[in-house]
């Protein structure tokens, strides 16, 4: 079974060695990484190691991180995932995303997040997904709200306080439709 996902403007491909340059350009940007993990940019070696870890997770679980490729020009615009929350196998699945700075504000995060939700519900078969963000990361929180996710408040994940949101398949919002009042990201 292939794990590539196609959306209107994106081709979501499981991390592969050919994505290294594009992913490193994003992960090496301090602005992109300020709300991710320890807030520090990744080195090229760390990005390479992440690609290798992710490939193992795809093989083991059938889900993990995708490189978000522009369908217009093939450039790596970002990454998105379905993964175990905090990398704990007993934890619920989470969706996540990050984008190159020049791709911010164009709706790519919402588009990728909706596709990740659909993948989790239809291909993986889970009943709900979680998303977490640094409490100051308003852009990611807005994406969660557009998806119709329910605010669970601040919880501890990845060793830090996170704004935590949940989306249940039974709510009828499995496709992550944006709210009518929210502008596109």
Image (cartoon, rainbow, N blue to C red):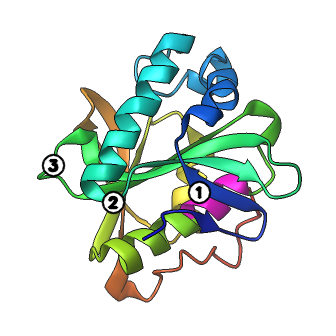
Stretch of the chain drawn in magenta? 108-113
Q: Is residue 165 above or below residue 79?
A: below
Pointer 2 residue:
62
The C terminus lies in quadrant = bottom right
**Cα distance in 3D space between marks 3 and 1:** 25 Å
Quick check: 99 above or below 92?
above
Q: Rounded to the nearest whole Å, what is the CA distance between mark 2 and mark 1? A: 24 Å
Q: Position of residue 71 (x, y in %)?
A: 81, 58
Q: Quadrant of residue 107?
A: bottom right
Q: Callout 1: helix, strand or loop?
A: helix
Q: Are marks 2 and 1 in contact (CB under 8 Å)?
A: no
Q: Going 69% across and 69% down the picture, which residue do you hit?
A: 7
Residue in the picture at 35% in, 81% down: 169
Dot in front, 2 or 1: 2
Numbered badge on residue 89: 3
User: Counting residues from the N terminus, which is met first, the one under dot 2 or under dot 3?
Assistant: 2
Q: Are marks 3 and 1 in contact (CB under 8 Å)?
A: no
Residue farthest along the right direction in this orientation: 72
Query: Magenta stretch: residue 132 in it?
Result: no
- Residue extending furthest left? 90
Residue 19 lies, in percent from the top left, at 63, 35
Q: Quadrant of residue 129?
A: bottom left
Main secondary structure found in the magenta portion: helix
Residue 155 relative to residue 67: left or right: left
Q: Secondary structure at mark 3?
A: loop
Which residue occupies 64% across, 34% down? 18
Can you identify the residue that label 1 sits on? 143
Alpha carbon distance from label 2 to label 3: 13 Å
């Amino acid at each position: 079974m292939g794990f590539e996902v196609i959306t209107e403007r994106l081709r979501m491909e499981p991390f592969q060695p050919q994505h290294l340059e594009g992913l490193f350009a994003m992960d090496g940007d301090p602005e992109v990484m300020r709300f991710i993990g320890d807030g520090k940019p990744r080195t090229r070696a760390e990005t390479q190691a992440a690609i290798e870890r992710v490939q193992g997770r795809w093989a083991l679980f059938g889900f993990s991180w995708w490189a978000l490729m522009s369908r217009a020009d093939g450039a790596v615009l970002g990454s998105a995932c379905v993964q175990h929350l905090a990398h704990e196998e007993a934890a619920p699945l989470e969706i996540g995303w990050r984008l190159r700075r020049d791709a911010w504000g164009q709706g790519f995060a919402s588009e990728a997040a909706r596709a990740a939700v659909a993948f989790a519900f239809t291909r993986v078969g889970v009943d709900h997904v979680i998303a977490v963000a640094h409490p100051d990361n308003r852009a990611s929180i807005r994406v969660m709200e557009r998806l119709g996710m329910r605010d669970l408040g601040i919880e501890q994940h990845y060793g830090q306080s996170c704004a935590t949101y949940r989306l249940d398949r039974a709510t009828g919002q499995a496709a992550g439709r944006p709210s009518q009042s929210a502008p596109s990201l």
